[in-house]
Image: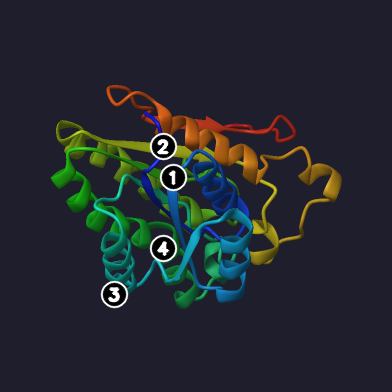
Amino acid sequence: MQLSGKTAIVTGGAKGFGAGIAAALRKRGAKVWITGRDQQALDRAAAEHDVTAIRADVTSAADWDRVCETVLADAPRIDILVNNAGAGVRIAPLAEMTDAEIEQAIAVNLTGAIFGCQRVARVMTKAGSGTIVNVSSVCQRQAWPGFSVYSAAKAGLGQLSNCLYTELREHGVRVTTLIPSWGATGFLSAAGRSARSAEDDARCIQPAEMGEWVAHVCELPAHLEVQDLTLVPTIQKIEPL
């Protein structure tokens, strides 16, 4: 499927993986809308990648309504939704987390994607086509101390994708779960953990590399889809629990 002329929404599109995804889709000719809460970062990404920015919080149902209304006022349909927005919030033992941190982690990593899928599925089902990519984490399959709430949210996101695959396939809508591990993003520092060295970061998944994988998924012929795809850098040693 050619992406020229397609309309895409990428949440968390101003930084990290989201910026790489937005750039890759735009390079292939899609009209790309990015969302996020940091207006300055959105403006920088929009100028750098030739995309359109909308300040919006994925955890807000009202913001999702506004995003979809804005996009559909400019385009006849929504062809691609990438639910990339997510955050560690705070990586710590569950007993040490506050109720507010738990609620925020679930909201940004799971509820926001549910809101987005709900609204965009209506549009795509009506059109009889579309691709939804939910960016999860290897934490949905593995277990590490301090990652309980984040992992639970990402596992929920993976199962959301599985169920939507069964709901939407008869309507011509494809659903993929992209499952990355260590990335050269600001995830660790934002979650209160020590950042990796620049040398180690260079051996992790780069935003542009993530963008290429999302673009490949979206470019598949309409009769093919990737149900899930795990991407792990060789620098990371994973010992399954």
Q: Position of residue 180 (x, y in %)?
A: 56, 40
Kindly identify which residue carries mark 1. Answer: 30
Closer to viewer: mark 1 or mark 4: 1
Q: Residue at x 36, y 43 (%)?
A: 6
Q: Nearer the viewer, residue 169 or 150?
A: 169
To which residue does mark 4 refer? 106
At x 55%, y 75%, the residue is: 39
Q: Nearer the viewer, residue 51 or 210?
A: 51
Disc 2 to disc 1: CB gap under 8 Å: yes
Distance of mark 3 from mark 2, alpha carbons? 29 Å
In screen coordinates, is 141 left or right of 224?
right
Distance from Cα at disc 2 to Cα at disc 4: 32 Å
User: Disc 3 marks which residue?
Assistant: 62
Task: Confirm or deny contact between disc 3 and disc 1 (CB under 8 A).
Answer: no
Task: Give the structural element (helix, strand or loop) at label 4.
Answer: helix
Amino acid type of disc 1? Ala
Q: Earlier in the sequence, mark 2 or mark 1?
A: 2
Q: Which image quarter: residue 204?
A: top right
Circle nearer the N terminus (4, 3): 3
Residue at position x 81%, y 43% in the image: 200
Q: Element at badge 1?
A: loop
